[in-house]
Image: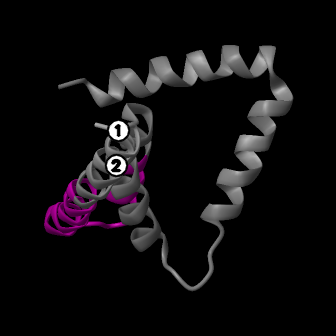
Amino acid sequence: MIDTKDYAAKLTAALGALGNTVPATLAGFEALDGAAARKGVLDAKTRELIALAVAVTTRCDGCITVHSAAAAKAGATKDEVAEALSVAMALNAGAALVYSARAFDAFDQQGG
């Protein structure tokens, strides 16, 4: 496992350096992230639980670090996080099943 507090500090520094090199790209990401974070129908806790589950499905350590902290700050409980992660696990297994069928079909199309 990684120390997420140490990782968050290093990630912030690395992103700052990257942003200095490609500021328009980072500004575009920040605009997209900010738009998704604006208060709407979903409360902050629900948005962060969704973000954490998506972070797991995309295997993004930085996203897991940021959104686990934000979920805790928004008042998510350990049980709520576990349930959101259970949904992520189910979807990843489902995606592997669907893409396995696609791969099997692609193999058949090649005369396999």
Instruction: Residue 95: name its quadrant.
Output: bottom left
In the picture, measured across the screen, residue 29 lies left or right of residue 71, that is: right
Measured from the top left, where is residue 96 in percent x and y?
26, 50
Which is nearer the eye, 36 or 108? Answer: 108
Placement of the C terminus among the 4 image quadrants: top left
x 35%, y 21%: residue:
6
Measured from the top left, where is residue 103 in percent x and y?
33, 44
Chain part drawn in magenta:
67-93
> In the rendered structure, does residue 92 fall within the stretch colored magenta?
yes
Measured from the top left, where is residue 91 in percent x and y?
27, 61
> In the rendered structure, does residue 56 fall within the stretch colored magenta?
no
Instruction: Residue 37: name its quadrant.
Output: bottom right
Determine whether 16 is above or below 34 in the image. Answer: above
Q: Between disc 1 and disc 2, whose residue precedes?
A: 2
* Residue position marked by numbered label 2 in the rendering: 57
- Amino acid carrying label 1: it is Gly
Pair 1/2: label in front: 1
